[in-house]
Amino acid sequence: MNLIHSGLLKRLSEKYRIHLLSTLIGKPEIQQLNRYHEMNVNLIDAKIAHEHFLLKILRRCEKLLFSFVFEIETQEIKLLCRNKMFQKGFSCVRNARILRFIADISLRWFRNAIILLSKRLTSLPELAGYHFDGVISTSPLDIRENCIVNFLVTNKIRSMAMVISWDNLTSKGMMNANHEYVLVWNQLMAAEYHRFYNAFGFPAKVCITGIPRFDRYFETSNDTRSKKDFCRQFQIPETHKIILFATSARKHFRSQMLIAKHVIEYLQLHTDLTLVIRCHPDDPIDAYQQLAEPRIRIWHPGNRTYLNARTFSDWLPPFDFLHSLHEMLRNCDTCIQVASTIRLDAAACGKPIISIAYDDPEDTPYTESVRRLYDYSHQLPLNQLHVDTMVHRKQQLFNALNNALARTELLNKPQDKIRLFTHFTQPKSVETVLKYVDEWLK
């Protein structure tokens, strides 16, 4: 989806003949996408098998060893949330040098076994008539894509991995395929890849590309409509300042309605404000119907989560998903977010950011609290940059809104600060990816 919505897939299709293999996109959807993005991408009609139970068992063991060997904060927090006794034992054995040595050797064995087994268990006769020059894995920590890559590698087809999100290397276990090229956002992710995979003896070329979908934020001229047009669409008075609240997935944060109600309380103290709630696809729009305040505008993608989708189209995000996000960020006066990538998006747009770090009730245990999300591995370096205001109670939220809405100009410092994550502060990412694809296929 990131490749499609960023325009990267269209640019690739202008130079290469692209065949798409997906569990999420069917024939009607690829036709719609081709028309909307004015590209020509072919869909491969092949059935991708579910993960074999033996691979699933091996991967669970591998993920546990991965967390232990590399001391991954994200995985340790998730373990703490599931089983306190297990976490305590996990911590106790960490300092035992002999156990660490055994774990390191075992991790290598498990990864090699998974790669070998995935080759033997995968059969895709539908691909026999194709003559691929290469395969690009856009979710390279997904075992189904690992199986496809490993299957194709046996036929001497080269492979490239695109790590499409800043949390993937530390949140999804291990990449069980060896790629010639690995594309990452930034130097932090490149260092993570080298740390986790250099010991496995397959020297991939790691390339830093920036974030393709962020190119639109750094363009000096674009087709984003004026604030007047934006206000007309959402029926917002032009004299109003706009608060954008981007919700998160329910499974991560269940107190979002509380935050919405607190912002409404703030609205009632001011007559010149409008709240725009941008719902996460997993956030039910029906829940917000109870909010009667006339100065609320609710945007929802209207699709279902993948697990609950009845058809491909139920899951597929709107074609203008990234465009609408850019418009909201560009035209809002401050953005409220909950431990999501929106923190980077808003900073790239130079907007004051308020990060929610409290729950309902406020004494929610750490293992269930939103606070734990800011302690995940990928969040820690961003926390240190202080591009946002972290709030731990309602009054802090009100104070942060006062400060953010008092600003009259865009901020410049956040863009410079988050260069550690975006790599570029100019629209160079898509071109950089294309350059590395060309180099890879030579």
Image (cartoon, rainbow, N blue to C red):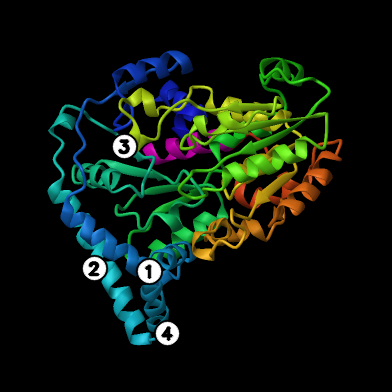
For discs 1 and 4, the disc positioned in front in the rendered view? 1
Is tag 4's residue or tag 3's residue first in the polypeptide sequence? 4
- Tag 3 residue: 134
Q: How far apart are the alpha carbons under marks 2 and 4?
A: 22 Å
Q: CA distance from mark 2 to mark 3?
A: 27 Å
Q: Quadrant of the image for the N terminus?
A: top left
Residue visible at 70% across and 17% down? 235
Q: Are marks 2 and 4 in contact (CB under 8 Å)?
A: no
Q: Is residue 442 visible?
A: no
Identify residue type, mark 4: Asn
Is 439 within the magenta? Answer: yes
Residues tagged 1 and 4 counted as in contact (Cβ below 8 A): no
Local crowd at mark 4 within 10 Å, few (<14), some, or many (≥20)?
few
Is 139 on the left or on the right of 301, as rendered? left
Q: Nearer the viewer, residue 403 or 298?
A: 298
Q: Which mark is residue 83?
A: 1
**Vertical position of residue 171 compared to residue 324: above or below:** below
Which quarter of the rendering shows the C terminus? top left
- Residue range in magenta is 429-441
C-alpha distance separating marks 1 and 3: 43 Å
- Residue 109 is tagged as 2
Q: Which residue is mark 4?
A: 95
Q: Looking at this view, is 193 or 291 the one in front?
A: 291
Type of residue at label 1?
Asn
Q: Is residue 108 left or right of residue 219?
A: left
Q: Relative to residue 316, is residue 388 drawn left or right?
A: right
Name the spot of residue 243 as percent of width and height, x first. Answer: 72, 35
The earlier-in-sequence mark between 1 and 2 is 1
